[in-house]
Image (cartoon, rainbow, N blue to C red):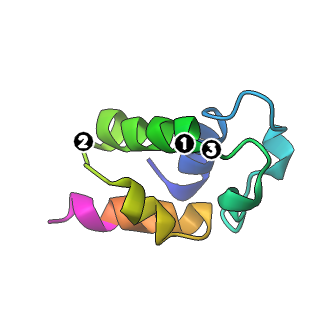
Amino acid sequence: MNLNEFVKAFASEFENTSEDLFTPKTIFKQLDEWDSLTVLSIIALADEEFNVRITSQDLRDCNSIEDTYNLISSKQNV
């Protein structure tokens, strides 16, 4: 999965936020819909799509969607 595909997958975890707001540089924690359930959804996305385990702390350390993609990609190579 490349970065643009990841952005689309990330956006699909948000039910009420326009897909137009999602780019690699989007600061996802600033989105109104960002909450603990969305955190769990992104953790599940990493596990199901990438077979990578990330934690809520990992997500706290990320700012943008691209940061999250890079984190997941780096854990794939371990």
Q: Nearer the viewer, residue 56 or 49?
A: 56
Q: CA distance from mark 3 to mark 1?
A: 4 Å
Foreground disc of the pair 1, 2: 1
Foreground disc of the pair 2, 3: 3
Magenta stretch: give its range: 74-78
User: Label 1: which residue?
Assistant: 36
- Could you say which disc has been placed on residue 51 in the image? 2
Q: Is residue 78 left or right of residue 55?
A: left
Q: Residue 27's quadrant in the figure?
A: bottom right
Q: Is residue 77 left or right of residue 59?
A: left
Q: Is residue 24 above or below residue 12?
A: below
Question: What kind of element bears circle 1?
Answer: helix
Name, please, the residue furthest toward the left: 78
Task: Give the residue displayed 53% in from the left and 48% down from the top.
Answer: 6
User: Label 3: which residue?
Assistant: 35
Q: Residue 13's quadrant in the figure?
A: top right
Badge 2 amino acid: Asn
Residue 61 lies in the magenta stretch? no
Q: CA distance from mark 1 to mark 2?
A: 21 Å
Task: Give the residue displayed 49% in from the left and 65% down from the top.
Answer: 60
Residues packed near mark 2 inside 10 Å, few (<14), some (14 to 19) or many (20 plus) = few
Q: Earlier in the sequence, mark 2 or mark 3?
A: 3
Name, please, the residue furthest toward the front: 36
The picture places residue 73, in percent across and down from the top left corner, at 34, 62
Q: Is residue 39 left or right of residue 77?
A: right
Residue 77 lies in the magenta stretch? yes
**Count of picture labels:** 3
Badge 1 amino acid: Ser
Callouts 3 and 1 close, C-beta under 8 Å:
yes
The picture places residue 47, in percent across and down from the top left corner, at 30, 39
The picture places residue 38, in percent across and down from the top left corner, at 57, 39
